[in-house]
Amino acid sequence: MQRVNNHNARKGDARALDPRLSLRDIGHSFVPGTYLFRHLTVDFAAGEVWGLKGPSGSGKSTLLSIVAGWEAPREGSVARIGINTTRWVFQNPLGVAQRSVMDHVALPFLAVGLGRQEAEHRAADILGAFGLEDSADKRFSLLSGGEAQRLMLARAAAGKPDLILVDEPTAQLDRATAATVNGVLGALAASGAVVVVASHDLETLEACKAVLDLQEFAGTNNESHVINPVGRL
Ligand SMILES: Nc1ncnc2c1ncn2[C@@H]1O[C@H](COP(=O)(O)OP(=O)(O)OP(=O)(O)O)[C@@H](O)[C@H]1O
Ligand SMILES: [Mg+2]
């Protein structure tokens, strides 16, 4: 429970085939000689929500980019096993103002060639799972912050991703709405995805299987500590 580690998956164990990521001795710097973090070794498995915390500027979003493969780490390696589709959910929900909630979630299904009826049928199922069934016909521009954030998560889920990266999902939400979004993150993980969430929100982090504190890996700390980085708050 405390340790994020999938090394012990047995041969022949179905879980060994689940999507997972394996980061080994990762270090990253944008400015030569000044590391954001170093010597970071961690495994993220499917079916759970993994948290990243740390002060502003500690590199949470950067580490998400490294996990996604957008940014190459200066040191170390990232193995992505069974990860074919990745989705991001950003802090500020980015939707199309005039499009309906239904359109946002149906689009990924239309994009893979389903007819509109089937696409909307599947989208309706997902909207239900995210508590948005009554908002299907609302325009994006009329959604509350929490509804918009849940819609972004629903849209991510519609792509059936193996990996979902979520950056500060609850930063702008009230407590009750944040709690709903935290529940949704758990549901996304339960659907078989690896979910990694960067957050300052204690309740979001508390809902994670384990939390990695980037402060423990700050570049100013030159001890070569290898690592049992992850534990509950
Ligand atoms: N592409 C880039 N080029 C140069 N510096 C960058 C780049 N991206 C991020 N940085 C710097 O790296 C540091 C870490 O940024 P990052 O966005 O990862 O922090 P964060 O932990 O996500 O912060 P916050 O909590 O404020 O979102 C910051 O000082 C930032 O300015
Ligand atoms: Mg950030």
Image (cartoon, rainbow, N blue to C red):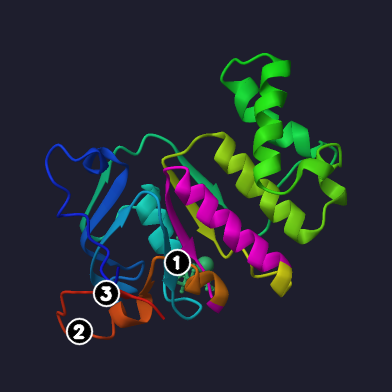
| Residue beneath disc 3 | 229
Q: 96 or 174, which lies in front?
A: 174
| Residue beneath disc 2 | 222
Q: Earlier in the sequence, mark 1 or mark 2?
A: 1
- Please tell me whether residue 73 is drawn above or below residue 107 in the rendered image: below
Mark 1 or 2, which is nearer the eye? Answer: 1
Residue 173 x %, y %: 71, 68
Sort mark 3 into few (<14), some (14-19) or many (20+) by Cα contacts within 10 Å: some
Q: Earlier in the sequence, mark 1 or mark 3?
A: 1
| Quadrant of the image containing the N terminus | bottom left
Residue 55 x %, y %: 47, 81
The residue that appears at 67% across and 13% down in the rendered structure is 115
Mark 2 near mark 3, Cβ–Cβ under 8 Å?
Answer: no
The residue that appears at 72% across and 65% down in the rendered structure is 177
| Quadrant of the image containing the C terminus | bottom left
Residue 129: quadrant of the picture: top right
The residue that appears at 52% across and 48% down in the rendered structure is 188
Query: In the image, what residue type sits under mark 3?
Result: Pro
Whether residue 153 is visible, yes or no, is yes
| Residue beneath disc 1 | 208
Residue 166 x %, y %: 52, 56
- Please tell me whether residue 208 is drawn above or below residue 84 in the rendered image: below
Query: In the image, what residue type sits under mark 2?
Result: Asn
The segment highlighted magenta reads 177-202
